[in-house]
Amino acid sequence: MECFCCSTKLPSSPSSSILNQRASSSPVGGRFSKKVLRPGLLSSPHSEPFIQLNDRLNPFAYQRRSSNFSLRTYKGPIYAEAKKQAWDLGRFLSTLYFFNGPPSPAKFFEFLIEKLSGPTPSEPVKAMETSGIVLVAGATGGVGRRVVDILRKKGLPVRVLVRNEEKARKMLGPDIDLIVGDITKESTLVPEYFKGVRKVINAVSVIVGPKEGDTPDRAKYSQGIKFFEPEIKGDSPEMVEYIGMKNLIKAVKEGVGLRTGKLIYGFEGGSSRELPWGALDDVVMGGVSESTFQVDPTGGENGGPTGVFKGVVSTANNGGFTSIRTRNFSVPEDVSAYDGLELRLKGDGRRYKLIVRTSSDWDTVGYTASFDTVDSQWQSIRLPFSSLRPIFRARTVLDAPPFDPSKILSLQLPVSSIRAYIKDPITPRFVHVSSAGVTRPERPGLDLSKQPPAVRLNKELGFILTFKLKGEDLIRESGVPYAIVRPCALTEEPAGADLIFDQGDNITGKVSREEIARICIAALESPYACDKTFEVKSVIPFSEPFTVDPENPPPEKDYNLYFKTLKDGITGKEMLEQSPVPL
């Protein structure tokens, strides 16, 4: 990334330059003769001024550089003076080498001259396009296949994760976009398979069936209510519900994103991420301005580390700008799960420009956005990816490809931290189908005789509910925006019955698989469902089958009406240390 700021006129009412982080200084351009400026600004009648852009270190203090590069503070008036000075060829060459060298010096000069002199056109450019594939895990199960069918009818891009390709294509169609993998085997979840996935509906579940087996037409499975002596078929609950969940979250986490965003650069709390910043100054076109980037261990907003940009800006030799830029990243930064970049900075009231590059070439298209700063105040600046304009040598490139946030290779801008963010309102990125009853096996004082079979037989079934709860906890702790749906006993009945949504893991009853599929899809688009855990059942009792007249089907539900009743932080785990609530 780059941050570039340049001017050919001296500001009419200059203010002190105070900017935390690697950045571009506010330059003085053009030719001036002993123009008086306020202390703390940009140039001197005697020598090139050294700008300190962090007021915590020495606010409004001008620091002069002597012949041996030591610094001493000067607080008198500061002047800008245009004059001819010796050009530093060594610094020019070190700049080229730091940034891995441009194709040719001549081309590099042409690039910078065009950048400084060319106006930016205001024509509209193509909007950024982003993929939004919904991954359905467990797509051949009772809920999963219905989720796939509904998503495809809505025209949404779908990819399925299945273990048996032949079965999936036979059930879902030969053209289905699929990943053949097993969540219990991490090695089968190749990251490349999940590229473009932005949301996940997980309907994977351990298989439970009658000990004596089912009929060829799965009549016992389909009726879903009458009790049969059950047993685990296939992989254990620990492998599917816990280890499998851990593997799945790891596979999709980069693509779906975190609620708090992704730190690209900065020092926040106990975490930090540093980047190789270097000065890109007017020495590359014959000027003598000079800048540097340092880390102050106590200069941050809350007393922690922060980057500090310092620069010498001189109008000599027709110069007048300094800036900071990263080297190209060895591996492109993928922030395609997010909606933009958020900068935390302390500015000087001037306007700056962020440039993001997605190519390793030096002289190439960059994607840019400008932003204003507030003098001497910390602020957060959000720059949506959709606002980035493609430029080449300061001119808008109308036929440039849309910005690709999966391939950021370099940055240049002035901030204390950079992170990718998800825009508000945040909606779930990971919807998981769990089960009612997951907190009940260990609940003190609970009468198990009144509980569903899975609660009574939790131990005999490999602690199925215990591991389902552990899997839920992995989602809640992952940082991914989520919704956890806990259906009561699943049936093959049609959707359409009135529903009861509850929290705290207390209800029993039945609900159709078709209804759960619809709820999962609705949750993906609802901020009211985000980071919520809830149970669902139909109002129809077990003893009554629910049917629908095809000629007069019930109206489609507005699930937001149910989601709006949900509260944060209620999972039923809070009851493990309390007396049980009567059913």
Image (cartoon, helix red, strand yellow):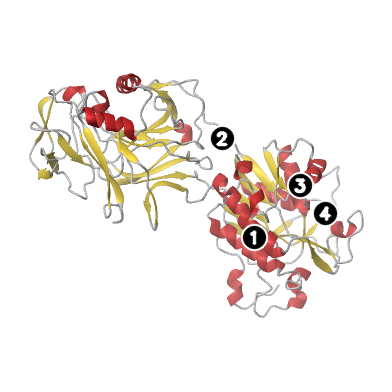
Q: Going from the N terminus, do you reach mark 2 or mark 1 first?
A: 2
Dot 2 falls on a residue whose secondary structure is loop
Q: Quadrant of the N terminus?
A: top left
Looking at the image, which residue sits at the far bottom? 445
Image point (51%, 33%), residue name: 404
Dot 3 falls on a residue whose secondary structure is helix
Q: Going from the N terminus, do you reach mark 2 or mark 4 first?
A: 2
Identify residue type, mark 2.
Answer: Thr
Image point (72%, 78%), residue name: 447
Distance between mark 2 and mark 1 Cα atoms: 31 Å
Position in image of residue 365 (x %, y %): 43, 25
Distance between mark 1 and mark 3 Cα atoms: 25 Å
Identify residue type, mark 1.
Answer: Ile
Q: Quadrant of the C terminus?
A: bottom right
- Give the numbered dot on residue 243: 1
Image depth: mark 2 or mark 4 in front = 2
Residue 249 in sight: yes
Dot 1 falls on a residue whose secondary structure is helix
List the residue tagged with mark 4.
492
Distance between mark 2 and mark 4 Cα atoms: 36 Å
Relative to 362, is 422 above or below? below
Image point (57%, 46%), residue name: 256
Dot 4 falls on a residue whose secondary structure is loop
